[in-house]
Amino acid sequence: MMKIEISEKVENPLLQRTEIKFKVDHSNSPTPKRLDVRAQLAGQLGVPEEVVIIDKLASMYGRQVASGIARVYGSRQGLEELEPKYLLQRGLPAEAKEKEKPEEKPKAEEKPKEKPKEKVKAEKPKEEKQKEEKPKEEKPGKSEGK
């Protein structure tokens, strides 16, 4: 169904990875999923899927060809250290993403606690403005007495 053609392969010894540019021919079918492309690319390169990450995958307008960029690391540890978390999430199956979502919910509960503090801070400057206005009213009265 889909054919992957590697157009460029660059070794990056400093970051211990191989950077790959590729094209996917997906005639008579929609743009393939990242997981499918990752699996086929790993098989074509002879490396485990866990060390391959798809950075970009986009179809060309009006054509049944998608171009992409992938990176292949020497180890899973190297991949986790260098790649942003959002890309690691994109590479996971839907079941694995659902397991990690409940961890983010407690963070959302903490944010509303901070908002009332901001309201208290906003009220204090109003009181100070009222105090500043009173001395201004007294000054014209003093000048009248002189």
Image: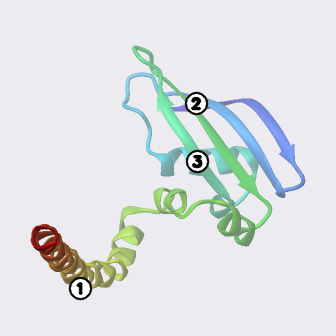
Residue 131 occupies which quadrant of the picture? bottom left
Residue 112 lies, with reference to residue 82, above or below; the image says: below
Asked whether 113 or 72 is in front, the reply is: 113
Residue in the picture at 58% in, 47% down: 54
Residue 19 occupies which quadrant of the picture? top right
Asked whether 134 or 77 is in front, the reply is: 134
- In the image, farthest residue toward the right: 13
Q: In this rendering, would 17 be left or right of 130?
A: right
Amino acid of disc 1:
Lys
The residues tagged by marks 3 and 1 sit, at their Cα atoms, a distance apart of: 38 Å
Q: Secondary structure at mark 2?
A: strand
State the residue position of label 3. 54
State the residue position of label 2. 3
Question: First in sequence: mark 3 or mark 1?
Answer: 3
Question: First in sequence: mark 3 or mark 2?
Answer: 2
Amino acid of disc 3:
Ile
Question: First in sequence: mark 1 or mark 2?
Answer: 2
The residues tagged by marks 3 and 2 sit, at their Cα atoms, a distance apart of: 16 Å
Q: Which mark is residue 113?
A: 1
Residue in the picture at 38% in, 23% down: 28
Tag in front: 3 or 1: 1
Q: Residues within 10 Å of mark 1 (few under 14, many from 20)?
A: few
Residue 16 lies, with reference to residue 141, above or below; the image says: above
Q: Secondary structure at mark 1?
A: helix
Q: Is residue 1 something one can see in this rendering?
A: no
Residue 110 occupies which quadrant of the picture? bottom left
Residue in the picture at 39% in, 14% down: 62
Q: In this rendering, would 108 be left or right of 51?
A: left
The residues tagged by marks 1 and 2 sit, at their Cα atoms, a distance apart of: 52 Å
